[in-house]
Each structure stands twice: as structure tokens, then as C-alpha cells.
Amino acid sequence: MPLAERGVAWAGFGHHVPERRVPNAEIEAELALPAGWIRARSGIEARHYAAPDQALSDLAIPAGAMALSGVDPGEVGLLLLATSTPDHLLPPTAPLVAHRLGLSCGAVDLAGACAGFLHALVLGAGHARMTGQSVLVIAANLLSRRIDPAETASRVLFADGAGAVLLRPSSNPAEGLRSAVLRSDGAGYDLIGIPRGGSRLPFDAPGKGGLRMAMRDGRKVFAAAVEGMTRSASQALAEAGIAAADLMAWLPHQANARIIDKVGANLGLGGVEWLGALAQYGNSSAATMPLALSLRMGREPALPGGPVLLSAFGAGTIWGAAVWQHRP
């Protein structure tokens, strides 16, 4: 079909979390925190941790397979894997995931931290619309091995998990992205990070530490996330020509409940369905959005057609929002 007549549809959904469930009580006991402390401050009740013999690809592959159920592998032209915890620094993990899924398409890792799925969705939709090929977007993270067990700020939040969405060209040009706003501010580059392991500070550089994720200033991260998500979402809505009341659903990155509540209140989304899985699955960074979407798509009644707002904020700092038309 001609490019001008081509839209992009959500055509398949998948998710996977490790078997081990870690309730708040286990972490609260280890960190000597009062019972209920984590739930009150984050909205999280439990999270899942990978087994010692599991790697990132072991989470991404079953999520991708679920999204591809009944799909001819030949229709997929690209796999985008949004992750901050690949199997190895080199080679990228996406080609291995594609191979294990029976795909021979292009495959690349995308390191966008907690905003990785949003960026991958926007890029994948562009590829699907331009080429007429389907795109598999997977977001997965195995953060339990990268957090400092003694650092409360990150220990109580982060989790392991994966989610996937298949994007398929549609004959309805109104379906798919209606707007996208992607932003960054490198001034906040070191607010959240794993210092050691790159070219700036290799693993064998003098000194100790720097191998675990650290959140330097939680309050500053909170303020930046609320401001960035609010501002970009407002712009995305304006560019799509719709009001908050016109939304069918809101899919935010599941950072913590206080950020989500504040952004939702700022945008006036009280009457809109919020798609989330934070309470039982924690913050698996980029994976939270497709994980929540897949879980919702598997429930009845089905998610009705209409515009969906997506919002995310991640380390770097990068953030953004998009409006996606789901089944006009």
C-alpha cells in the first residue's frame, strides 16, 4: 500500500517475569525498615528476581515469543531490544534473541534506560510505516544484579522483567502514532547510573566500587521526572489535537506510585484508565510499559479503541511522551 495510506497497529503482546517473587517484607527485614515502609513510599508490594542461571535474553525471548504467537517470522523486518542490562557488553543481545525466536531480521539493542521502550516504539513505528514490515519491540531488564543491596533508594524499587509488542503495518492511516515528543538533558547525566564498565571508567581502572546502580539524588530525580513527563505529555497531546479527557488510556513508565500520581494529577487524568503493574512487579525500567500493556491486553473486557498516552523518564536524563491511536 502507498506510504500515505499506511498506519501501524499493535498486533501482538507478550511478557515474562522470573519465577522468584520477592515481597516487601523480605527487603524490609534485611534493611531494618518498618513494615509497610516500602508500600507507603513507592506503591510497590512485590517484585520478581531472576534465578542465578538466568540472563537478560532468558527473559526477553519468552516475552517475544508470546507477542509472536501465530505470526509468520518472515513478516518481521526488525527487532528492537530496549535494555540497560544486556547479556554482554559485546556483542549486542538482540541478534541472539532474534535467532532464538526464529527471526532473521535486523536486530539491535537500544539503551534508553527507563525511557527505552518509548523510544523503541517511536522508532519501530517509523520503520513499520516506511517499509511495510512488522517490527518486534521488546523491553527487558535484569536489575536485581545491578542494584546495591545496601542502598535503600534503589533496592526497594528495581526488579526484573520483560514485555513485548508486535507492530504491524495497517491499512488505516489513522492507526498508530499521532504525536511523539522525545527530549534529553545531559546536565542530569549522573543522577542515576552504573559508573564502571564503559570507556570512561573501565572495569580494571584504579579504585573500587562503581559496579552497582546508584541514585545520587532521589529528590532531584523525582522533581525532574514529574516536570519532564508532565511537560512532554502536554505537548504530545497538543500536537495530536486532543484533550486529556479524550484519552482512552494512559501508559506511564512504572517508576513509583508518587511520580505516577503527581503526573496524572498535573495532566488531569483522573477519569482515564491508567495501565500499570507496579504493585506486583516493581520497577523493571523500560520493561514496565510493555509488561503493563501486555497484562492489560490479556484481561477482559478488551481495551477499547481510542488514543493512548505513553509517558516515560529515564537516566541520562531522557524523557518523552507519545499519543498512540489504538484501533480507531
Image (cartoon, grey):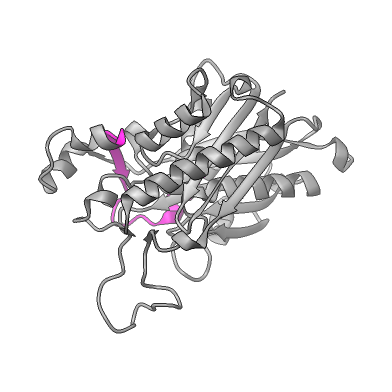
Q: Which residue of the protein is positioned furthest toward the right in this rendering?
A: 2
Give the residue drawn at x 72%, y 23%. Answer: 328
Give the residue drawn at x 25%, y 58%. Answer: 148
Q: Nearer the viewer, residue 154 or 65?
A: 154
Q: Nearer the viewer, residue 61 or 192?
A: 192
> Can see residue 177?
yes
In the image, taking residue 304 as reference, residue 228 lies left or right, namely left
Q: Does the magenta-highlighted stretch encompass residue 54? A: yes
Residue 291: horizontal and vertical position, in percent? 47, 37
Q: Which residue of the protein is positioned furthest toward the bottom in this rendering?
A: 206
Check the image and report above or below for 146 versus 67: below
Check the image and report above or below for 2 versus 110: above
Check the image and report above or below for 63 versus 36: below
Check the image and report above or below for 290 versus 160: above
Q: Quadrant of the N terminus?
A: top right
Q: Does the magenta-highlighted stretch encompass residue 144? A: no
Q: How many marks?
A: 0
Give the residue drawn at x 23%, y 38%. Answer: 38
Residue 183: horizontal and vertical position, in percent? 58, 52
Magenta residues span 42-63
Residue 228: horizontal and vertical position, in percent? 51, 45
Give the residue drawn at x 53%, y 26%. Answer: 297
Residue 164: horizontal and vertical position, in percent? 54, 42
Quadrant in which residue 244 is drawn: top right
Q: Nearer the viewer, residue 135 or 31?
A: 31
> Can see residue 162?
no
